[in-house]
Every structure is written in structure tokens, then in C-alpha cells.
Image: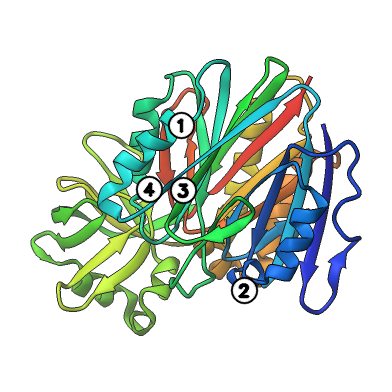
Amino acid sequence: MKIEQVQWTQADGWKPNVPGALNPEPQLVLVFGSPSALNDRAVLKTVQEAYPGACHFGCSTAGEICDTRVTDESLVVTAVHFEHTTIEAAHTEALDAGGSLDAGKRLAEAIPHKGLRHVFVLSDGLHVNGSELVRGLQAALPEDVPVTGGLSGDGDRFQETYVLWNGLPEVRRISAIGFYGSRLVIGHGSLGGWDAFGPERLVTRSRGHVLYELDGKSALSLYRSYLGVHAAGLPATGLLFPLSLRVGGSKGGLVRTILSIDEEAQSMTFAGDIPEGAYARLMKANFDRLIDGAVGAARSSFEGLGSAPAELAVLISCVGRKLVLRQRIEEEVEGVREVLGAQAMLAGFYSYGEISPFAPTAKCELHNQTMTITTFAER
């Protein structure tokens, strides 16, 4: 595997060089950038002309990861030449959250299944129910094929997100890459690091990923009472106080982040399902545990490679973690570097949702507020 990574900013242009130095030519070009950077067609044209034969795959972000640096308003381009691996790309539209299950099925059916080792997916971040998208993918993929990926971002604005297709940013889009090859090994890991507080409450009314009532009371009113002075900044401040969900008799839970609120309906829309009958509890940040969560995700993804050292690691971390950690944000990426080693190329972004199994033997889920890592190596 040979890799080239470059970064563009309005102030400094391309660093360390203009893209296109990788030889032999790459099959895959990962492009993660702010919405404004992705909409700079001159910049994207440079990338397209540098790698004319590659699949250009990426999305808009809430922050870009380039090596151990975390930046905003930039474009990070990571070109990858696989020596023993082939890829296939597919895409579909994300018309609305209600069609997410079918969209996942369509996407999975569009990827050839023979010899398929792994699927990496990038989705619109605002008009998709990530839980249903994952269910659709799993329903139509072979059982032994893991899925990782994430939902695109738009900083803390929550206005419009993009996914690249044919090298150009498009709205309401879901894209996926299928990886093939007996010499390819892939690891994955996903962990959070938030602390629960307050009482556990029963979800008494919800529909899909829209929450109306907790313990028979307005969910939005209850949420506001806990947030206090932070309530005025909803939905953005909701990233600082996600919900932990416990379904059935499970001891652990999934974490869900707010995408929007509806004052008239007194409801909150989340990135994934909030099922009736589940138990919800608010969470708040623990700085050290957030960083420990990133390190734990790195260890899990590294162990999935067996004896092979990681050559490429795609990091997808939640925008809520970025808002909490602030100036300490690069500590979680530096922790990943310490685990994976200096030889691994790190690329990724801050997202509106992360897609990964929690453990190698677990089923794939949509997560919020986690660091999710997918590592690649050829042996």
C-alpha cells in the first residue's frame, strides 16, 4: 500500500505539495473537507486532475483530521494505491429519513458481493435515520461483511451536508466503497467516554428517530430543564449533553445526539432511532475518559489486524467530542497515533454519527459521540 496525503487551506494553499505525486496511481482518493472547501470547484478540479483514474470518495465535515492535526475550513486529501486490493463504489439518494432502510438495501445490493471483505459508507448527515440505514445495509449484505463509516457534517451549523460522487459534492447522497482481496486485513473499533447523570427515564412516545415524551412528559421541556443556561443554544448545545439509550434488558446503551428540535411539536430529532420502551439518560463530558475512549477504539482496531501493522487508519469522531474537548481535541488523535504507530497514515473527520460494530463479534450500529476507527493493511 502506498499513500500520499496533502491538505489545502485558503490561507496556505496546498501543503506539503500539490496533489499528484503518488506513483503508481491510486485507486482510492479520500476527500474530507468543510462545506466551503468542497464548494470551491477550482480546488476540487485540482484533485480530480491529479488523480484522474481514481474513485474520489469523501464528504463534508465538522472538522478535518490530517495526521495528528485537527483543522477547520480545510480540505484533506489522502490518495491510496492498493497493491493487492480492488474496490467497487456505489451510491444512492437519501430523499428523507423515512426511506433510510430502503436506501441502505439499495446501496448494499449495488455492491458486488462475491469476494467482498468490507464496506465503508458515507452518508448525508441531516436527512437520514442512521439506524435504519445500517439495518438496510445489513439486511442486504452477507452476514460476515462488516460495515463502518459515518454521517457527513456541517460544523455546528446543521444546515446542509455533502457526500462526494463522481468527484463532486452532492446533497442527500449516500455512497459506499466495497473492498476485495484475500491479502487485505481490516480492523475496527468504536468507543465513547461520557458520564451519565440524572435519573433514567422511559421513552413513552417516539416515532423512528423523533422523540416526543419521556415518562409521559414533553421530552423537549425535560431536556431544557436539565440544560439550564445551555438550553438557549439548542440544537447545537445538545451536542454537549447526548442521550444514553438502554433497550430491553441490556446493561450498556447506545448514545444519541440531537440534530434538530421542533417547538410546535415539542419534539427532538436524533441521528438514530429512539424506540418506545427504551430507557434514556442524559450524559455529560468527562475529558480524560473521552481521550481514553479514542485510545480504546484504536486498540480494538489494531487488534483486528492481527500481526499486520496498520498502514491506513480512517478516524471518524463526533462533532460533540470536538466541542467539548476544544483546545484538547488533538489529544484524542495523538492517543490513536501512539497505539497504531508512526507508520500508519491517519485521515478522517468529525461527524454527525459514526457507523461501526462496538466489538469484532458485535453487529454494526449507528453511534453518536464516539471515536470510530477503521484500520487497513495488506500482507
Residue sitting at 64 percent across and 30 percent down?
87
> Of the residues shown, which amino acid type is indicated by label 2?
Ser
Read off the residue under disc 2: 36
Q: Position of residue 27 (x, y in %)?
A: 74, 37
> Of the residues shown, which amino acid type is indicated by label 3?
Ile
Q: Position of residue 261 (x, y in %)?
A: 28, 72
Q: Earlier in the sequence, mark 1 or mark 2?
A: 2
Cα distance in 3D space between marks 3 and 4? 11 Å
> Of the residues shown, which amino acid type is indicated by label 1?
Ala
Q: Quadrant of residue 217?
A: bottom left
Read off the residue under disc 3: 174
Cα distance in 3D space between marks 1 and 2? 30 Å
> Of the residues shown, which amino acid type is indicated by label 4?
Gly
Front position in the image: 334 or 259: 259
Question: What mark, if any, has residue 322 been given in the picture?
Answer: none
Question: What mark, if any, has residue 130 been given in the picture?
Answer: 4
Q: Earlier in the sequence, mark 2 or mark 4?
A: 2
Q: Position of residue 338 (x, y in %)?
A: 78, 44
Judge the density around disc 4: few (<14), some (14-19), many (≥20) Cα neighbours within 10 Å: many
Residue sitting at 42 percent across and 74 percent down?
236
Marks 3 and 1: which is nearer the front?
Answer: 1
Marks 1 and 2: which is nearer the front?
Answer: 1
Read off the residue under disc 1: 110
Cα distance in 3D space between marks 4 and 1? 19 Å
